Image: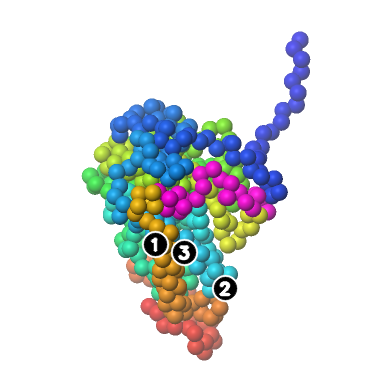
Amino acid sequence: MSEPHPPLRLHVPEPSGRPGQPTDFGYLRLSPAGAVRRPPLDVAPADTLDLAYALVRVLDDDGRAVGPWAPEVDTETLRRGLTAMLRVRAFDARMLIAQRQRKISFYMQSLGEEAIATAHAFAIRPGDMCFPTYRQQGLLLARDDIPIVEMMCQLMSNARDPMRGRQMPVMYSYKRAGFFSITGNLATQFIQGVGWGMAAAIKGDTRIASAWIGDGATAAADFHNGLTFASVYRAPVILNVVNNQWAISTFQAIAGAEVTTFAARGVGSGIASLRVDGNDWLAVLAASRWAAERARSGLGPTLVEWVSYRAGAHSTSDDPTRYRPADDWQRFPLGDPVPRLKQHLIGLGAWSEDEHAATQQALEAEIAAAAKEAESYGGTLIDNHVPPIESMFVDVFKEMPPHLQEQLRQARAEWAGHSANPKREARP
Ligand SMILES: Cc1ncc(C[n+]2csc(CCOP(=O)(O)OP(=O)(O)O)c2C)c(N)n1
Ligand SMILES: [Mg+2]
């Protein structure tokens, strides 16, 4: 007779750090800059397995671009890239203050992750469609097609909010900028993006899709369903997993990254996959271009895990000091994307401390002026603005069906008593 087994125990992954106990970042699988190979575009998915457990990096500790992934890029593009990151950071900082001043109800910043969306925006083409989550404002802010004022009006749900107050703040939607409506239901971006990519292939289009998800959201079924369809039909899509280490208060290991990586999920589904330093603007540009070129050449999907760190709170409703050490970001081995690209540009002789400070100042002034203009259209929480009742009913059906017409009539009658409110404005 063999010995009886001890009682079984459930394994629950835990972060190495907690408030008052510094994080041991030894759990991150790092590779030196320049060390990871760059396979041919038509690499077989299974032959990317090593890349899914390594980390593609270009910028070394001295800010030099090294190795096979160092992209061909002119200094003007790099300067625009750094400016785009600074613009996102300034926009976020200003909107956080606006939330604290009760001018907007809610905000989500992308502090520490700015390289990912901004460099990606430089790698895709107009007409390509992104399916972003709430932390990819950099896709919009890196390009000039959407005025900052308009984004702020969305955040304020005011009279010029293109979403007419029907979306939460930060849930932008810009077809003309290739920015699909954000859905609050996590992971839907993957099935939507893959479906859009499949449709592009069916129609013989030349545009590709780029779908976005966070580490935590990969635990949702839509992530896995999306991978299956992308692989089976070789959908022209970039599958971006932003691993910023946290999903609100839940550590990334809880979504499955303790014994494997998110990139390896792609290989397991038959998708070429990369794991990339998301705080390295050059690595993001190079990997995004590689994935975009694969998709556009009919070589199918690429999954990219971008390794980064969510430096701020999850949202304005969150207090991260309750579940992680306050100085985590300062100790994060991949650092801050802004000083890393800045150091590179200064090394090339294409940037300076003075230019950096002047750019920051100019961006802050631009954003302050935009905020002032957006506020002039009313609708901050403080000014007690009430949108017209009709706005709840329009834009749903091409022609309003009788039951909604009846509800609108009733609503108008009930709201008649409020019509004395001078803040209430007429709008179609
Ligand atoms: C299907 C679904 N489940 C849960 C939530 C609630 N929720 C909103 S954000 C979030 C955390 C997501 O974390 P992650 O995917 O890592 O993205 P991050 O916020 O770090 O960018 C959760 C659980 C939701 N919106 N949708
Ligand atoms: Mg996350």
Magenta-drawn segment: 322-344
Q: Which residue is mark 1?
A: 355
In this picture, residue 355 sits left or right of residue 96: left
Q: Count up the numbered dots.
A: 3
Instruction: Tell which of 18 and 246 is nearer to you.
Output: 18
- Residue 273 picture location, percent across and down: 41, 35
Instruction: Tell which of 45 and 39 is nearer to you.
Output: 39
Q: Is residue 338 magenta?
A: yes
Q: Which residue is mark 3?
A: 90
The amino acid type of the residue labelled 3 equals Ala
Distance of label 3 from label 2 (alpha carbons)? 17 Å
* Residue 424 to residue 259: above or below: below
Q: Residue at x 54, y 43 (%)?
A: 333
Per the image, label 2 sits on a secondary structure element best described as loop
The amino acid type of the residue labelled 1 equals Glu
- Residue 368 picture location, percent across and down: 45, 73
Distance of label 3 from label 1 (alpha carbons)? 16 Å
Kindly identify which numbered label has been placed on residue 101.
2
